[in-house]
Amino acid sequence: GIQVEQSPPDLILQEGANSTLRCNFSDSVNNLQWFHQNPWGQLINLFYIPSGTKQNGRLSATTVATERYSLLYISSSQTTDSGVYFCAVADSGYALNFGKGTSLLVTP
Amino acid sequence: DGGITQSPKYLFRKEGQNVTLSCEQNLNHDAMYWYRQDPGQGLRLIYYSQIVNDFQKGDIAEGYSVSREKKESFPLTVTSAQKNPTAFYLCASSLGVRSGNTIYFGEGSWLTVV
């Protein structure tokens, strides 16, 4: 299956700081999604972004499909942003394949 | 409320026993999935189903079984053949298994085998 690598594996920020999370994938995809898993285990879909750029409040994402990577930007981070961020990819007709995630801790 | 309901939230079982995790959705989604998550790891696909009465193995199907008799329901049985069943299990659904379909997750079930 398609390999997904996320970096960095862990990140600690002070409230108000900005950050960039990266997702590299090994083959062409037509489905790429970013998720946030809160400390209680709930997974929330942030973006569906197989290509291009999208923004939602303080979060934005960019996928450069030809170079096989995606970036998730978090601006003015808040403690509620803490958790694990997952990138997941798929080719047509297949279920999503997840990376190992970036664990983010935002301190007051 | 629309969504995906998993039960039970926490489950303890003795080694050698089969256990079934429930997953129900009222989103009218065709596709349903089961993922397993181990501490500090990503999600790994166990089984998925694109339509009633049909399902496909994922990357780690050995020791697990599923059924899809109704569109709303996709129960997962963890059998005694699963070598290391203690994990967090997540059920999900989407309109279909193709690009453009956002996937939604239940709250998960913690299984501990002692």
Image (spheres, rainbow, N blue to C red):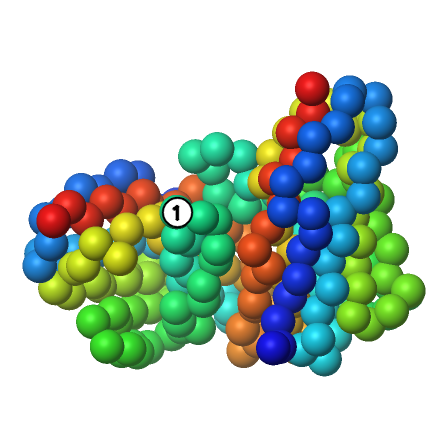
> x, y (%) of residue A68?
37, 59
Q: Label 1 neighbourhood size at 10 Å, few (<14), some (14-19), many (20+)? A: few
> x, y (%) of residue B111?
66, 35
How many marks can you see? 1
Q: Is residue B10 above or below residue B34?
A: above
Callout 1 amino acid: Pro
Q: Where is residue B101, by image quadrant?
A: bottom right
Of residues B87 and A10, the one drawn nearer to the viewer in this rendering: B87
Taking the image as shown, residue A104 lies to the left or right of residue B45, namely: left
Secondary-structure class at tag 1: loop
Q: Is residue B26 above or below residue B21?
A: below
Q: Residue at x 84, y 27 (%)?
A: B17
> x, y (%) of residue B99?
57, 74
Q: Is residue B41 above or below residue A101?
A: above
Of residues B26 and A70, the one drawn nearer to the viewer in this rendering: B26
Q: Residue at x 27, y 62 (%)?
A: A72
Q: Residue at x 80, y 64 (%)?
A: B73
Q: Residue at x 48, y 55 (%)?
A: A42
Q: Quickly name the residue at label 1.
A: A39
Taking the image as shown, residue B3 lies to the left or right of residue A59, namely: right
Q: Is residue A98 visible?
A: yes
> x, y (%) of residue B112?
65, 29
Q: Disc 1 sits on a residue from what chain?
A: A
Of residues A3 and A105, the one drawn nearer to the viewer in this rendering: A105
Of residues A28 and B46, the one drawn nearer to the viewer in this rendering: B46
Q: Is residue A50 above or below residue A100?
A: below
Q: Is residue B58 visible?
A: no
